[in-house]
Amino acid sequence: MAEFAQPLREQDVDADPFRQFSVWFEDAVGSGVRSPEAAAVATATAEGAPSARMVLVKQTGERGFVFFTNYGSRKGSELTANPRAALLFHWDPLGRQVRIEGPVERLPAEESAAYVRSRPRGSQLSALASPQSRPVADRGQLERRVAELAARYEGELPVPDFWGGLRLVPEWFEFWQHREDRLHDRLAYRRGDGEWLIERLAP
């Protein structure tokens, strides 16, 4: 099992950042981190005004890092206007962070629909009922809407066209390891000419 504040050396990491992420993610799972797939996602308006929030990253790998949202939400709207984002995973028991940056694209509708169908009914109802990021009178308004939808659709629920997946396609990674002397280890991967280049960053 990985331990807190262990050195992060160039000779110890994988040349492929996706494989390196997989190793660290499995370490986070093994350490008992609650929701190791939780990450902060930062977006910005077309004018550059930033915002950030936590999401659950449901898919990882060479195709990219996928999370789901209402496309009309603040993050959805900002990514429509400015389709780039940054993700930050923080696994405190291991003293580790992973930062990932790149362009963002929508998943094909059929892939989003497959994920929607895999969710519990209550989660599907909440996504249908919630005008995400918009003001509502009170919680009761949302609960009444959920009840109305549950009564209307006793069987399979419709797949909303305003809700689905977003994929961040990485162009840059940083693996950050806490060190007790505060001289933290930071290894960054950036795309070169057909390969990933690794460089150490000062803490």
Image (tube, rainbow, N blue to C red):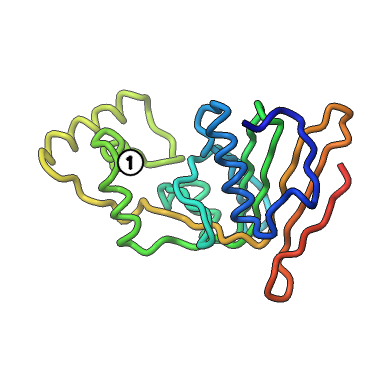
Q: Quadrant of the C terminus?
A: top right
Can you identify the residue that label 1 sits on?
A: 127
Quadrant of residue 51 in the image?
Answer: top right
Pinpoint residue 27: horizontal percent, then vertical percent: 59, 36
Residue for point 67% across, 44% down:
98
Disc 1 marks a residue whose amino acid type is: Ala
Pinpoint residue 82: horizontal percent, then vertical percent: 59, 60
Residue 30 in the image: above or below residue 71: above
Foreground residue, 168 or 3? 3
* SS assignment at label 1: helix
Pinpoint residue 61: horizontal percent, then vertical percent: 52, 56
List the single residue furthest toward the bottom.
193
Pinpoint residue 62: horizontal percent, then vertical percent: 54, 61
Q: Does residue 161 appear to the left or right of 88 in the view shown?
A: left
Residue for point 11% across, 42% down:
155
Residue for point 59% across, 62% down:
103
Residue 69 in the image: above or below residue 17: above
Residue 131 in the image: above or below residue 33: below
Q: Quadrant of the N terminus?
A: top right
Foreground residue, 192 or 5? 5
Residue 106 in the image: above or below residue 125: below
Residue for point 54% across, 31% down:
30
Q: Does residue 96 appear to the left or right of 167 in the view shown?
A: right
